[in-house]
Image (cartoon, rainbow, N blue to C red):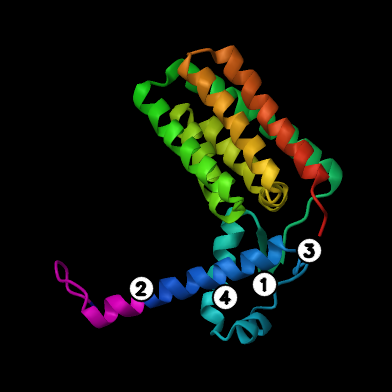
Amino acid sequence: MTEPGSHPSPTSTIAILQTRSLADAVRDEIEAMVLDGRFKPTERINELALATQLGVSRGPVREACSALAALGLLESIPNRGFFVRRLDDAELAEVAEARAYVFASIVSAVALRSDAAAVADLRALLLAMDEAAERGNVRDYYPINLRFHTRLGELCRNRRLAGLYQGLARELHVQRYRALSNRNSLALSNAEHTAIVDAIAAGDDKRAFDAGLAHVLNGFARMRRAPKR
């Protein structure tokens, strides 16, 4: 055990970094399998078989599955394991509608409470998403998209609203990711983000509300058009 105030040895530091890198790589691979449809909705993740397939021990697979469950891609059922999440069409519509109105309320509040520094933060994220959209790379775009939405939740200064939004958003990760897999969808999505930020910069809470509502509802329409896997 490392004594208080001391530093871990180079060997232990390298081991930690290697473990984290392996867990990240395994998580990325399982995420791709879920999003590509290699794991079907409600399918149980066989940790042992997957570890064998990936050539790793069971530990990194379990760690990766836990991380993906926290994101909402998988569901953890005690004493049974991890399963791919599935919502039926009616549930998807209900979650999307609720998310749209919560998100619209968030961006409306941000328009009333933000400052120049906050707007600059949001525009930096817009630029990063534009660059990913130009490359047509959803794997680069999607994490920045999540940061953008999370940042808006922080800027609204209402933890209840932000918490409601994050809970609803987690239920739709698989569908949202697939809907953005089309190159044109990336550009459309970020154009809607830009309209939201422009309204926020103008301090126009009504326009921000309308732009936020339209963004999520348009995203749901793109989601319904995306190929089912």
Q: Is residue 219 left or right of residue 5?
A: right
Distance (Cα) linking label 3 and label 2: 33 Å
Q: On the image, which quarter does residue 86 sit in? A: bottom right
- Depth check, mark 4 against mark 1: the one in front is 4
Is label 2 in a helix, a strand or a loop? Answer: helix
Q: Amino acid at mark 2?
A: Leu
Is label 1 in a helix, a strand or a loop? Answer: loop
Marks 3 and 2, the one that precedes in the sequence: 2
In the rendered view, would you say 132 is above or below 1? above
Is label 3 in a helix, a strand or a loop? Answer: loop
> For the C terminus, which image quadrant?
bottom right
- Depth check, mark 3 against mark 1: the one in front is 3
Marks 4 and 3, the one that precedes in the sequence: 3
- Depth check, mark 2 against mark 4: the one in front is 2
Residue 88 or residue 14, whichever sits in front: 14
Distance (Cα) linking label 2 and label 4: 16 Å
Do we see residue 106 in this rendering? no
Marks 3 and 1, the one that precedes in the sequence: 3
